[in-house]
Image (spheres, rainbow, N blue to C red):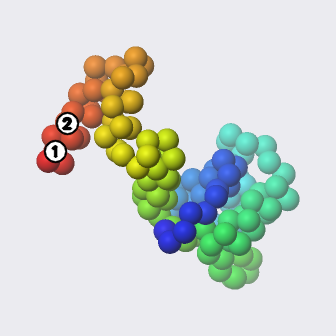
Amino acid sequence: MEKKKNVSDAELEILEVLWTAGEPLNTAQIRSMLEENKRWERTTVLTLIQRLVKKGMLRQEKREVYYYSPAVSREAYVKEETKNFVNKFFHGRSGNMAAALMADDDLTKEDIKELRDFFNSRF
C-alpha cells in the first residue's frame, strides 16, 4: 500500500467479506454475507462500497451490475496497519510492542509459547 488510507470499522467489514469470498461480489451478495452479523440497509452498504472505491481500496467491474473486489490483499492491509500502530504507540520500535505484549497479564502460557516459537523461527 502506497499511502495510508483511513478505513472505518464499517468499511473494514465490507473488505473482510470480499477477502473471505475470494472473488468479486455484487452489492446484493455483499449485503447478504453481511446480514449474518449486520442488518444494514442497501443504501448503507452502497455508501460504504463507494467510499472504499473512492479511497482506492476496492475495484469495481461493470457486468450486468457492478462487481467489487479488494484492491489490496488482507495481508498487505494488516501489515500496513500494524506498522502504523507500532509507529503511533511504540515510536516505531517493534521490540517495545513485544515488551508491552509480554507485560500484559492477559497473555496465557500458550500465547507466550506461540510468541516464543514465532521469534525463534524468524532468527
Which one is nearer the viewer's eye here, 33 or 7? Answer: 7
Taking 2 as reference, is 91 above or below it? above
Q: Secondary structure at mark 1?
A: helix
Q: Which residue is farthest front?
A: 91
Q: Which residue is farthest top?
A: 105
Q: Residue at x 60, y 58 (%)?
A: 15
Taking 117 as reference, is 15 above or below it? below
Q: Amino acid at mark 1?
A: Ser
x and y percentages locating residue 3 in the rendered image: 54, 69
Q: Residue at x 26, y 33 (%)?
A: 114
Q: Residues within 10 Å of mark 2 (few under 14, many from 20)?
A: few
Horizontal arrangement in the rendering, residue 45 relative to residue 43 (left or right): left
Q: Is residue 75 visible?
A: yes
x and y percentages locating residue 17 in the rendered image: 59, 54
In the rendering, which numbered label is found on residue 121? 1
Image quarter for residue 49? bottom right
x and y percentages locating residue 61 in the rendered image: 65, 80
- Residue annotated with mark 2: 117
Q: Residue at x 72, y 55 (%)?
A: 31
- The number of callouts visible is 2
Image quarter for residue 94? top left
- Marks 2/1 in contact by CB < 8 Å: the verdict is yes
Q: Residue at x 14, y 47 (%)?
A: 123
x and y percentages locating residue 21 in the rendered image: 54, 59
What is the CA distance from the residue labelled 2 to the residue labelled 1?
Answer: 6 Å
